[in-house]
């Protein structure tokens, strides 16, 4: 769906497919603060969907979007089809924020979007040999400012309502 990550200079260059198969250009989110999250339905952290929906509802009218990207790289905790994932999220957590098709977020076949995010916001200290760290688990979060810059990365253990994350979102929304 996208060209190689090497030709992508900003987040808005990417085209992705929503979970229903509809193409979505990320430039449609220009001017908004984004929280990009790799998600899974059968994970101990799956209840974070509730918090993601809560902060989405609280801040969406201020120009905030949560973008969910299902991934199955961690313990095969997202085995379902896109339609099964969509049904699960809506019926169990009332998810209303944009959900995208399942992608690969770790390893050799990492989707170019996630390669881009990791390159722009490696963990402190980077990985082995100075390379950026890979995604560590489900529900890792990337915060993107209104200009499309990846400004922060949060651990999967950081809940969506954690004061540090909420504070970072509010700071970006005020800009």
Image: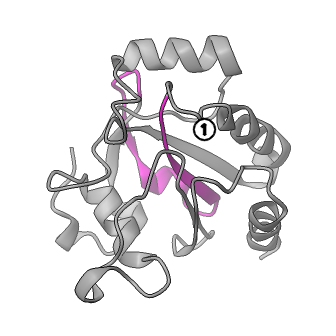
Q: Which residues are magenta?
A: 19-40
Q: Is residue 83 magenta?
A: no
**Along the line of sight, the residue nearer the viewer: 23 or 159:** 159
Quadrant in the rendering for residue 51: top right
Residue at the disc numbered 1: 45
Q: Residue at x 62, y 70 (%)?
A: 145
The residue at 27%/69% (across/down) is: 8
Question: Dividing the picture into quarters, in which one does residue 52 lie?
Answer: top right
Question: Where residue 165 sits: x, y (%)?
Answer: 74, 63
Please tell me how many numbered marks the rendered image carries.
1
Residue 172's x, y, as percent? 74, 71
Which residue is at 78% across, 45% downward? Answer: 55
Q: Could you tell me residue 86's position as x and y percent?
A: 49, 18
In the structure shown, which secondary structural element does the residue marked by tag 1 occupy? loop
- Left or right, 59 with reference to 25: right
Q: Is residue 45 above or below residue 14?
A: above
Say few, some or many: other residues with alpha carbon within 10 Å of mark 1 (under 14 / 14 to 19 / 20 or more): some
Q: Is residue 67 above or below residue 168?
A: above
Q: Residue at x 50, y 50 (%)?
A: 28
Percent coordinates x, y for residue 105 in the rendering: 32, 50
């Amino acid at each position: 769906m996208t060209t190689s990550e090497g030709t992508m200079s900003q987040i808005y260059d990417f085209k992705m497919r929503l979970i229903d198969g509809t193409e979505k250009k990320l430039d449609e989110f220009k001017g908004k603060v984004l929280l990009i999250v790799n998600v899974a339905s059968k994970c101990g952290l799956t209840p974070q969907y509730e918090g993601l929906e809560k902060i989405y509802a609280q801040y969406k009218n201020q120009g905030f979007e949560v973008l969910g990207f299902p991934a199955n790289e961690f313990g095969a905790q997202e085995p379902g089809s896109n339609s099964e994932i969509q049904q699960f999220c809506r019926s169990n957590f009332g998810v209303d924020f944009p959900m995208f098709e399942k992608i690969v977020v770790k390893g050799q076949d990492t989707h170019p979007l996630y390669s881009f995010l990791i390159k722009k916001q490696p963990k402190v200290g980077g990985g082995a040999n100075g390379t950026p760290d890979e995604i560590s688990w489900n529900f890792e979060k990337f915060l993107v400012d209104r200009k499309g810059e990846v400004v922060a990365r949060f651990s999967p253990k950081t809940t969506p309502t954690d004061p540090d994350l909420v504070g970072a979102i509010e700071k970006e929304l005020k800009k």
